Amino acid sequence: MTRTFSAAAAAELKTILDDFPNKKSALLMVLRLVEREFGMIDDGGMELTAATCEVSVAHVLGMVSFYTHFKRPFHGKHRFMVCATLMCSIGGPNGRCDQSLAVIQRKLGISPGECTFDGLFSVEKVECLADCNRPPVIQKDNDHHVNMTDSLLEELIDSLLTKEGKSAVDYSSQKGTPMNARIPSISVKQSVPRP
Ligand code: FES
């Protein structure tokens, strides 16, 4: 799918590119712009990024798959990232990461690496989210939550369910889908002619 930037995004892109010595070095910033503009980075977004930064799509894919924070098509609409590094595994007075994962499993029927059957929710264990003194730490989409208790997490999930017109009952008898099964075929065609 051929993608183009909106006029507002094109203006922002110009500012970004002006800040870097060459287009290739602006790649991460351009990816963030593509993510904001289209809500995720899919094949079309990678191709647009590759053309913008004058690199191959394979190069963009390498960047997007290394920096796992980018929103991809196989993530749920609402993406839970639960820190499972040492301090959140040990936990604190408010709980541990495995308790948070258990709440998500109980309410939404998904384990780490899975998406709900309707694509609305997904959950992943992630590495340190840089708030180690306030465990457990969770990110939901772009929201950062620290000292997450089971009851606060339940409230957060309930508010999302309400917003989506769903209830936990909708997920109680459903199995999660492995997110890898949702990866579309990815084009790695060379978008920039080799010299
Ligand atoms: S170990 Fe969880 S935020 Fe650092």
Image (cartoon, rainbow, N blue to C red):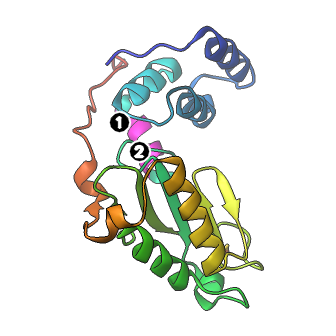
Is residue 64 inside the magenta stretch? yes
Find the magenta span and give its range. 58-65
Q: Secondary structure at mark 1?
A: helix
Residue at the spot x=49%, y=77% of the render? 103
Is residue 146 inside the magenta stretch? no
Image quadrant where one finds the C terminus: top left
Quarter-wise, where is residue 11 in the image?
top right
Question: In this image, 174 relative to 168: left or right?
Answer: left
Instruction: Tell me where residue 3 appears, x and y as whole percent.
Output: 42, 16
Task: Check disc 2 and give the amino acid type.
Answer: Gly
State the separation of the CA atoms marked 2 and 1: 6 Å
On screen, residue 159 above or below 191: below
Image quadrant where one finds the N terminus: top left
On screen, residue 11 above or below 54: above
On screen, residue 133 above or below 79: below
Q: Secondary structure at mark 2?
A: helix
Q: Which residue position holds label 2?
A: 62
Quarter-wise, where is residue 178 in the image?
bottom left
Quarter-wise, where is residue 97 in the image?
bottom right
Instruction: Tell me where residue 148 appears, x and y as whole percent.
Output: 67, 75
Instruction: Tell me where residue 173 appears, x and y as whole percent.
Output: 25, 70
Q: Which residue position holds label 1?
A: 58
Instruction: Tell me the crowding category of disc 1: few under 14, some 14 to 19, or many 20 or more residues within 10 angstroms, Cα based.
Output: some
